Amino acid sequence: MIIQPRVRGFICLTSHPEGTAEHVKQQIDYVKSKGEIKDGPKKVLVIGASTGFGLASRITAAFGSQAATIGVFFEKPAAPGKPGTAGWYNSAAFEQQATEAGLYAKSINGDAFSDEVKKQAIELIKKDLGQVDLVVYSLASPRRTHPKTGVAHASVLKPIGQPFTNKTVDFHSGVISDISIQPVESEDDINNTVAVMGGEDWKFWIEELKAANVLAEGVKTVAYSYIGPELTYPIYRNGTIGKAKDDLEGTVPFLNELLKDLHGISYVSVNKALVTQSSSAIPVVPLYISLLYKVMKEKGIHEGTIEQMQRLFAERLYSGSAPALDEKGRIRVDDLEMREDVQAEVAALWEQATTENLEEISDIAGYRNDFFNLFGFNLDEVDYEAETNEVVRVPSITE
Ligand code: NAI
């Protein structure tokens, strides 16, 4: 079929198999161009492996240090006349390219929050790898059915205490408007968001992997967080999602204790704001990102997800010495984003930004391009008028 983008708000309903494969290939090429990550991970489980930071982590582990990878994700497979999700096609492309390079790569498509998928992952590790030496936790989800209570928790993106009003952009039209978001009405909103995006599920994973004896001596585990600028604090770091991130970060001491006898360690890495399927859903953030991109590209310090993860692995997690941590014990690869000069310039642009000057003062074009790239569109190498085979399988998954 001929597949063109079909956009509804901040999601694209279609994805292009060849485009996503090209996008994966470009990320692989980048990692290869940076050379081998010495003493990098060898057997890796990535939870949330199909898009964004999780996919970039999987690519970095595989092509930066020849790691065998198992990826867990929740994606819609392709069917005749119905393209699969981008994460499905990404995973198909990743597995194919990894296998061609002689690397082990298998995937599990299902709800990572469930006990069932944890069991499947453990069985697969036991059967094929024995143990893993790195567990990457990179889930981003709007909901979670709790495996013990059966309660379905839905996360919300709301401020706490007061309403929040600020600029936001419709990144397709480039129209800037004011948005007002009402604060949470009860603790329930906070608790539900923490239940979905906090640290409990990461803890469950590590507890169950350890109990099954599939974590290697010296194992590392890393999960991802965000801080960002003060202007997004009310909706991000001081809002419901920020409470969930506090909870995720607060899980590190518990996991370190749990992993002590294996001489293992857990980290949270604070990453840079980037266009992913999850971040485009957060009000205010797309305008901030498009201004940030402009400033960072002008300074020659812009990074995408793959550059971030390659740097995290090569210069933090596997640099040969313990990574520097901030006052709250976190790894920071948002260091360039948070540089004073960058933040001062973004803040000044934020004040000026209007619908009329947006194209000129921001990198909204770069934002849009990255958004379409996520779904395999806007890549020069692909002919979008041509027929393509939409029914692509992820080689290791039998439907
Ligand atoms: P993403 O939306 O690109 O990826 C989410 C992944 O989780 C996908 O692989 C998806 O299939 C998987 N997933 C979602 N629900 C699942 C479920 N129930 N079972 C199995 N897999 C499931 O998101 P992104 O942006 O890469 O986020 C990953 C982490 O990075 C999150 O913790 C996020 O807060 C964090 N982060 C994101 C930043 C950004 O600007 N995008 C900045 C800093 C941190």
Image (cartoon, grey):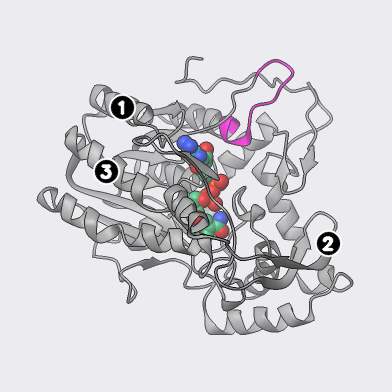
Q: Are marks 3 and 1 in contact (CB under 8 Å)?
A: no
Q: Quadrant of the N terminus?
A: top right
36 vs 241, left or right, is left
Please identify the quarter of the rendering in which residue 362 is found.
bottom right
Q: Amino acid at mark 3?
A: Ile
238 vs 253, left or right, is right
N-terminal-most mark, 3 or 2: 2
| Real-space Cα separation, disc 3 to disc 2, in angstroms | 43 Å
Quickly name the residue at label 2: 174
Task: Tell me: residue 291, above or below residue 10.
Answer: below
Task: Tell me: residue 363, above or below residue 91.
Answer: below
Quickly name the residue at label 1: 119
- x and y percent of residue 80 in the render? 70, 15
* Tag 3 secondary structure: helix
N-terminal-most mark, 2 or 1: 1
Of 37 and 112, nearer the camera is 112
Which region shows up in magenta? 79-89
Q: Amino acid at mark 2?
A: Gly
* Tag 2 secondary structure: loop
Residue at image coords 31%, 40%: 205
Which mark's residue is nearer the viewer, 3 or 2? Answer: 3
Quickly name the residue at label 3: 206
Q: Is residue 86 magenta?
A: yes
Which mark's residue is nearer the viewer, 2 or 1? Answer: 1
